[in-house]
Amino acid sequence: MQFPENFWWGAASAAAQIEGGWDADGRGPSIWDVLYPGHTKYNENPHEACDHYHRWREDVALMKRMGLKTYRFSVSWSRILPEGTGKVNPAGVQFYRDLVRALKDAGIEPMVTLYHWDLPYALYLRGGWQNPESPAWFAEYVRVVVEALSDVVERWMTLNEPQCFVGISYVGGEHAPFLNEEAALRPTVRNVLLAHAEAVRTIRRYARRKPLVGYAPTGTLFEPVGPDPDAIEQARYETFEADRGPFAIGWWCDPVLLGTLPGELTRRLGADLFTAEELASLREPLDFLGFNIYQAATPPRPGTAYAQNTWQGSPRTAMDWPITPDCVYWAVRFLNERYGLPVLITENGMANQDFVMLDGQVHDPQRIDYIHRHLLGAGRALAEGYPLLGYTYWSIMDNFEWACGYDKRFGLIYVDYATQRRIPKDSAAWYAHVIATNGAEL
């Protein structure tokens, strides 16, 4: 299989999930640090997580050994601005400057995600993403980060999965801030979209090196139930036009990439959600479209409780998500055809029942098979001419999996949370070989 010479082979993490050091060196708390009681499995919190804040040198060395070409990570807003706005925390800035320089020295391109769900608690007390000032708060924070890191960093992403930090956080009540308020939907959708556009403008204005700017949404992606054109068009309709509420891809991509509002969005939130001038301002040019994809959906199979791409005993991950490896192909194809941008797979991976075996190693053949199958889909998209910049495995290491606590392991690297010992899994060595051979042996 042929992958482009400059393909972005990478892995990803998020600050709240790996850093720990929640109150170290002047950092302010995030909503996940404060609001977790009663909402996470075993009442676990991210206060220590993987202690990456203190062990980042070891972690970068492991990434170098793996041969990663890129590493996608997020910046903790409250480590930079403890109160969310105002006074900058120099120690927080220095932490990220040291990290990106070490990545570059290791031959790894840093990819910075500016928001991955860890809103400063001080801003939550001021209304969080429901506050109309939140786009300005975000732009202020983005400017500080870009001024601090853009002499080294070229690759930027604004927001990770607004579907989740709005849909299952402000409305669904499953993630911080654990609200279940339908009335929160209109202001949060409005403010988050405005914040994304402000961030793009801020990056381009203040970056010291020419930036590549993207975005990392997710959404319910349907795959065809057959090869015929009608099945493909039905899957396309279900993906972009059917009513998925805040989990729809179009809610978060159509305004910023097409300059239009999906009909289901305006029917639910009102045609006056944005003025004409505001809607025009959302369409800031992007260099690529990131997408987090773990599974594909299909319509129900008549007469059963299964979807048409699942069956009794069909393979699933430890998250109980069906394994549908063609999802990468259809994501790249559908997104490129609709939005006309190169796609970057910003997350793809699986939770597995990993543990240290008698030989002291962590053997995870299911994860190897999962990655292999999904990379075959990536290769198919490339072979058919769809622009795909790279593949980013989620995640570089086991970590705090939000409301699931530490119960789910997605990592290429095993973390013993009692000792913080790192053990690269078999999948890490396998992925290293894929990278070294540029996927030629898949």
Image (cartoon, rainbow, N blue to C red):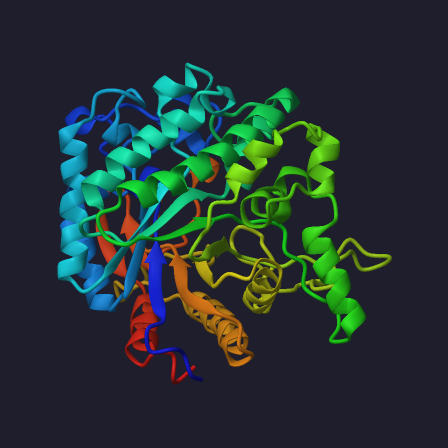
Return the x and y of residue 222 as percentages of the image width and height: 67, 58
Tag count: 0
> Quick one: which residue is furthest to the front in this view?
277
Please tell me in which quadrant of the rendered image residue 134 appears. Answer: top left
Return the x and y of residue 34 as percentages of the image width and height: 37, 22
Return the x and y of residue 172 as percentages of the image width and height: 60, 30
Instruction: Please give the name of the residue rendered at 72% of the width and 61% of the height, measured from the top-left corner.
Output: 235
Return the x and y of residue 175 as percentages of the image width and height: 50, 32
Indicate whether 213 appears above or below 412.
Answer: above
Going by the image, does 280 lie left or right of 112? right
Instruction: Please give the name of the residue rendered at 35% of the width and 41% of the height, measured from the top-left corner.
Output: 114
Instruction: Please give the name of the residue rendered at 68% of the width and 38% of the height, measured from the top-left corner.
Output: 245
Q: Which quadrant is the C terminus positioned in? A: bottom left
| Residue 442 appears in the rendering | yes
Q: In front: 210, or 344?
A: 210
Going by the image, does 373 lie left or right of 13? right
Instruction: Please give the name of the residue rendered at 46% of the width and 50% of the height, measured from the top-left corner.
Output: 285
Indicate whether 118 appears above or below 34.
Answer: below
| Residue 419 appears in the rendering | no
Going by the image, does 187 lie left or right of 356? right
Indicate whether 180 appears above or below 349.
Answer: above
Q: Which quadrant is the N terminus positioned in? A: bottom left
> Quick one: which residue is furthest to the right in this view?
303
Q: In front: 264, or 441?
A: 264
Q: In front: 228, or 266?
A: 266
